[in-house]
Amino acid sequence: MSSHALCLRLGLLLLSVSLIACSDQSVAYIRRPIPGGSGYWVERIVVKKKQPPPRDRKASRLLAPAVDEGQWNGDSLVGPPRMVIRLSEQKIYFYKAGQLAGISPISSGREGMATRAGNFAVIEKDIDHASSLFGDYISRDGTVLKREIDVRKDPRPPGALFDAAKMPYFMRITGATGMHEGYLPGYPASHGCIRLPRRMAEIFYHESSVGTPVKIVP
């Protein structure tokens, strides 16, 4: 084969590669000796690519990390309630007469506003509580001017309104600290309160009463 013919053939092969790379096929090349002569020729082998299996959305959901929304097994249990909050675990444990009735994830106070350990009790319950200390500063048309403020530390801009943070199923245990429904990012993030997912906040609220002991441990 002349050098001109060989160059032409290789050029056509390279063009073929560029076209096939954008298709559903892959290409393999094998160098074979030219029978009865010197040099090599290139054999092209086209292989159809394997297509990935159809995406199973249901299976994808099952394989996705599960969100911990807590568990409750206390409907059949009776006896005085008490709660234990373990800050290192970011969990709260609910007991009835010493038997474990429920477990829930929490989000406690973030750095600089850490939830204080100790022995407490529920001293107030308010199902539709709104904070008098924490919330946002908003304009009169509802535009948020400053988020997650503490009225004791953050001066109010001129003309701004205080939009109190909503704390449903609130159970106060001391001062400005209590348990309530709130956002759980997976780590301590509150102003000192103990946030719970909605379902568990509702259950714990109705299963507790003023005077229920609450122990917070590191």
Image (cartoon, rainbow, N blue to C red):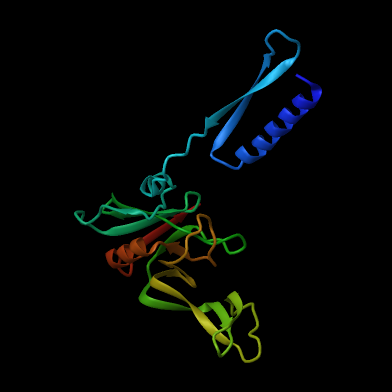
The residue nearer to you, when weighing 147 against 174, is 147
The residue nearer to you, when weighing 96 against 186, is 186
Left or right, 151 with respect to 92, comes to right
Residue 201, above or below 87: below
Left or right, 83 with respect to 161, comes to left
Residue 129, above or below 159: above
Place of residue 178 in the rendered image (x, y in percent of width and height, measured from the top left): 44, 68
Residue 50, above or below 97: above
Left or right, 208 with respect to 138, comes to left
Place of residue 131 in the rendered image (x, y in percent of width and height, measured from the top left): 48, 77
Residue at (39, 72) in percent of width and height: 168
Asked if residue 212 can be seen in this view, the reply is no
Residue at (53, 58) in percent of width and height: 188
Place of residue 91 in the rendered image (x, y in percent of width and height, measured from the top left): 43, 53
Q: Residue furthest right?
A: 3
Residue at (47, 58) in percent of width and height: 118
The residue nearer to you, when weighing 165 against 37, is 37
Quadrant housing the N terminus: top right
